[in-house]
Image (cartoon, rainbow, N blue to C red):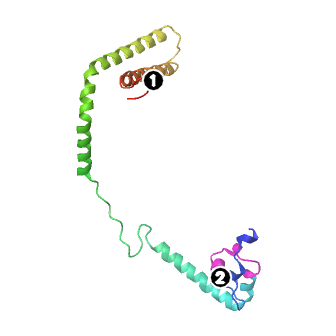
């Protein structure tokens, strides 16, 4: 430990040459490394400081026992915090209001739903037929080697579906 990590002499020594309560507490808690040289030797030689150190150590032990006896979840004299009930009615009202607000866009978007499902079905059937053709040609040996192809095809299909549905809403300048 460096010298500047130790307590200053004003905090360790009283005017009469005995140790302060701060120094005695540090010794009682086993933190003698923060005390300057000579403090522990003084306690060993001085009956007054040795007695004060014993009282400080006993007080620290009693405080530790009291702390261990207290339940960890609550403080003495302090009521436990009450749980706030979930505002079910407010959540239901907010969901109903958002569904009502989304209804016009859902209705307007449902017009091309049949064409979108048909295009998605066609894309999936093309991917499946291509996968069967590749797998049947013997180019793939085993199920594990087909997994990257299947996942890549699935990503392409999802990407095409997203681009196709969003493409009608976006202009060439990036605006809506």
- Judged from the image, the secondary structure of the residue bearing numbered disc 2 is helix
Q: CA distance from mark 2 to mark 1?
A: 70 Å
Q: Residue 127 at x, y = what percent?
A: 42, 15
Rendered view: 64 above or below 42? above
Residue 150 magenta: no
In the picture, residue 129 is in which quadrant?
top left
Rendered view: 101 above or below 19? above
- Judged from the image, the secondary structure of the residue bearing numbered disc 1 is helix
Q: Residue 150 at x, y = what percent?
A: 46, 20
Secondary structure mostly seen in magenta is: helix
Which residue is more in the foreground, 66 or 97? Answer: 97
Residue 50, label in figure: none
* Residues drawn in magenta: 21-40
The residue at the point 35 percent across, 14 percent down is 122
Q: How many marks?
A: 2
Neighbor class of circle 2 (other Cα within 10 Å; few <14, some 14-19, many 20+) is many
Q: Residue 149 at x, y = what percent?
A: 49, 19
In the rendered image, the residue lying farthest to the front is: 173
Which residue is more in the foreground, 84 or 133? Answer: 84
The residue at the point 71 percent across, 70 percent down is 5
Residue 23 magenta: yes
Residue 155, label in figure: 1
The C terminus: image quadrant:
top left
Mark 2, residue position: 24
Q: Residue 13 at x, y = what percent?
A: 70, 85
The residue at the point 68 percent across, 91 percent down is 48
Rendered view: 20 above or below 170? below
């Amino acid at each position: 430990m460096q010298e500047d990590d130790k307590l200053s002499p004003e905090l360790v020594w009283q005017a009469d040459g005995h140790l302060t309560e701060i120094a005695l507490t540090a010794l009682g808690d086993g933190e003698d490394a923060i005390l300057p040289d000579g403090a522990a030797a003084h306690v060993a030689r001085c009956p007054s400081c040795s007695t004060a150190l014993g009282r400080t150590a006993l007080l620290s032990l009693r405080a530790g026992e009291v702390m261990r006896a207290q339940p960890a979840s609550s403080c003495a004299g302090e009521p436990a915090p009450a749980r706030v009930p979930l505002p079910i009615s407010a959540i239901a009202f907010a969901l109903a209001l958002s569904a009502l607000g989304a209804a016009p866009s859902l209705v307007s978007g449902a017009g091309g739903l049949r064409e979108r499902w048909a295009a998605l079905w066609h894309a999936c059937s093309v991917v499946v037929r291509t996968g069967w053709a590749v797998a049947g040609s013997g180019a793939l040996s085993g199920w594990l080697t087909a997994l990257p192809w299947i996942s890549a095809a699935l990503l392409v299909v999802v990407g095409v579906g997203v681009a196709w549905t969003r493409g009608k809403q976006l202009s060439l300048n990036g605006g809506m």
